[in-house]
Image (spheres, grey):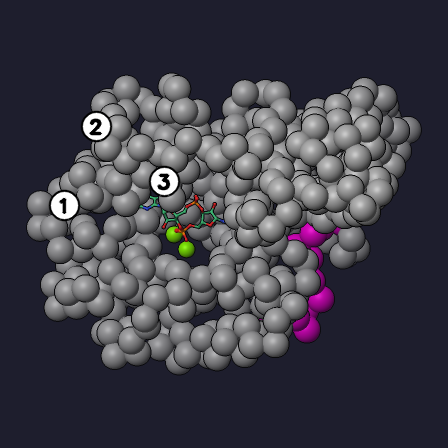
């Protein structure tokens, strides 16, 4: 896995750069409708085959039903551009999908950095950001991380944030959660994004704390709630009456004006809504937070504890929370099948949550192996790129319409199908 500018993935002595590219089939839903569900579910393997043929020295991994992660080394940033051109060229010839000749359309988001400059985890996150932008721009997005994205000037963002909501620059994406035993999508999480007119896509990691510091988080969350209530109703009208979860910043658990405004919206909404709160949010001012969470729960809002294990957990508070769901932080899930310690932590967390009468979601599930292990451990729901990346409401409606989760006899026909022995007994 090394390379030279003319041939990414070439000779080892030249590898001073590392690259990650995410390649996603953008016309996946259309193709699958054309060729049928079972053949469609294997489509990502056709893409992988063509990538391997184009970049033989690169490592590939299926990271979702329509996405391949490609990693390789090289000599300069130009290697990524060469690889991109190669992949684009490789997609020109149609695919022979059981006698039907079909064109596969792809989005490519790629990043590169000199070896040792960037942690692998950050490289993947940056590649995700690039893919997100690529989907939006409808052309490849390649980022050189050695130049360093201009650090978001927090002061400017603080000034721009209030207008951004008014100008419609904020939008939501939804990430489904699969209920393991029911083999069905049980709920979804709403994740906010900022499409900045000059800076491009900004992910919440870069502006939520800004919004909190600028006291804008209440306005942003109330806007989110309005959008989610509307989208939840749309989904219910489609026949998918799912609970949609909104992330609630810890700051808001002590904000009476927010609590009143959110409850007022919920009273008239008639929509299934959940709130995700982190354990640290509660630890800040437990008495007040617990009282307000109880108000939300009384309003019919499902409470989930987010990022469990990432903060300083306190069993004492956990027991007092009116929470129905515990979400295990993705830092324990991403390495689940390669670490010795993480499976033990996850297993005992699942047992603890069940003892407290909570359902458990594992976030950051990227591989079939992780999903299989989580199923054996009795995890109730899984969320992660394996099921779907966060997607627009229209793409989510399409995802649900596709009804890909219907159990079938041949396990290869559905990526979610597992033998009955995998599931926790009811
Ligand atoms: P979170 O609530 O824990 O959301 C899950 C994050 O993990 C999301 O990142 C999602 O894109 C990412 N993710 C999902 N599946 C996978 C996977 O399989 N692998 C990996 N590596 N990552 C995965 P995102 O969208 O960047 O959000 C980051 C955080 O920003 C969220 O973490 C949440 O704490 C916060 N956030 C997002 N939307 C809102 C919001 O509307 N309000 C508030 N207060 N916070 C929000
Ligand atoms: Mg969350
Ligand atoms: Mg989380």
Magenta residues?
A: 413-424
Above or below, 375 relative to 48: below
- Nearest the eye: 146 or 336: 146
Image location of residue 417, percent across then percent down: 69, 57
Image location of residue 98, percent across then percent down: 88, 33
- Could you tell me which residue is drawn at 68 percent across and 73 percent down? 421
- Could you tell me which residue is drawn at 63 percent across and 34 percent down? 110
Q: Earlier in the sequence, mark 2 or mark 3?
A: 2
- Could you tell me which residue is drawn at 34 percent across and 66 percent down? 311
Q: Earlier in the sequence, mark 1 or mark 2?
A: 2
Residue count near mark 1 (Cα–Cα under 10 Å), binned few <14, some 14–19, many ≥20: some
Mark drawn on residue 159: 2
- Nearest the eye: 26 or 217: 217
* Mark 1 touches mark 3? (CB < 8 Å): no
Tell me the mark number nearer the camera, choosing from 1 and 3.
3
Looking at the rendering, the quadrant in which ligand 3 lies is: bottom left
Mark drawn on residue 258: 1
- Nearest the eye: 237 or 189: 189
Instruction: Give the total of numbered labels.
Output: 3
Image location of residue 423, percent across then percent down: 61, 70
Q: State how far apart marks 1 and 3 are (Cα).
A: 23 Å
Above or below, 21 relative to 283: above
Does residue 422 belong to the magenta stretch?
A: yes
Q: Is most of the magenta stretch helix, strand or loop?
A: loop
Position of 253 with respect to 57 (left or right) is left
Position of 410 with respect to 228 (left or right) is right
Q: State how far apart marks 1 and 2 are (Cα).
A: 21 Å
């Amino acid at each position: 896995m090394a390379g030279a500018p003319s041939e990414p993935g070439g000779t080892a002595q030249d590898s001073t750069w590392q690259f990650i590219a995410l390649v996603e089939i953008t016309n996946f839903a259309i193709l699958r409708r054309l060729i049928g569900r079972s053949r469609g579910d294997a489509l990502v393997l056709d893409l992988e085959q063509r990538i391997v043929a184009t970049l033989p020295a690169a490592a590939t991994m299926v990271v979702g039903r329509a996405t391949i992660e490609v990693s390789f080394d090289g000599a300069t940033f130009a290697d990524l551009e060469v690889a991109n051109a190669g992949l684009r060229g490789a997609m020109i010839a149609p695919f022979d999908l059981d006698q039907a000749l079909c064109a596969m359309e792809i989005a490519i988001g790629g990043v590169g950095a000199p070896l040792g400059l960037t942690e692998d985890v950050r490289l993947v996150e940056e590649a995700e950001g690039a893919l997100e932008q690529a989907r939006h721009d409808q052309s490849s997005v390649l980022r050189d991380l050695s130049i360093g994205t201009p650090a978001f000037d927090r002061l400017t963002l603080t000034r721009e944030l209030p207008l951004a909501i008014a100008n419609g620059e904020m939008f939501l994406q939804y990430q489904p959660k699969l209920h393991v035993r029911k083999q069905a999508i049980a709920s979804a999480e709403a994740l906010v994004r900022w499409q900045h007119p000059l800076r491009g896509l900004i992910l919440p990691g870069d502006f939520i704390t800004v919004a909190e510091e600028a006291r804008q988080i209440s306005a942003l969350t109330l806007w989110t709630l309005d959008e989610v209530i509307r989208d939840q109703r749309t989904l219910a009208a489609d026949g998918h009456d799912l609970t949609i979860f909104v992330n609630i910043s810890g700051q808001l658990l002590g904000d009476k004006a927010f609590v009143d405004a959110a409850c007022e919206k919920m009273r008239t909404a008639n929509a299934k809504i959940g709130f995700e709160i982190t354990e640290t949010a509660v630890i800040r001012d437990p008495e007040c937070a617990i009282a307000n969470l109880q108000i939300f729960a009384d309003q019919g809002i499902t409470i989930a504890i987010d990022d469990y294990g990432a903060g300083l957990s306190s069993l004492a508070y956990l027991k007092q929370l009116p929470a129905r769901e515990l979400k295990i932080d993705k830092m324990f899930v991403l390495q689940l099948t390669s670490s010795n310690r993480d499976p033990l932590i996850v297993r005992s967390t699942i047992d603890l949550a069940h003892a407290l009468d909570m359902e458990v979601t594992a976030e950051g599930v990227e591989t079939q192996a992780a999903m299989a292990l989580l199923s054996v451990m009795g995890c109730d729901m899984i969320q992660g790129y394996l099921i779907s990346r966060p997607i627009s409401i229209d793409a989510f409606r399409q995802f649900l319409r596709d009804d890909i989760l219907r159990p079938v006899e041949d396990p290869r026909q559905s990526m979610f199908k597992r033998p009955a022995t995998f599931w926790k007994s009811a």
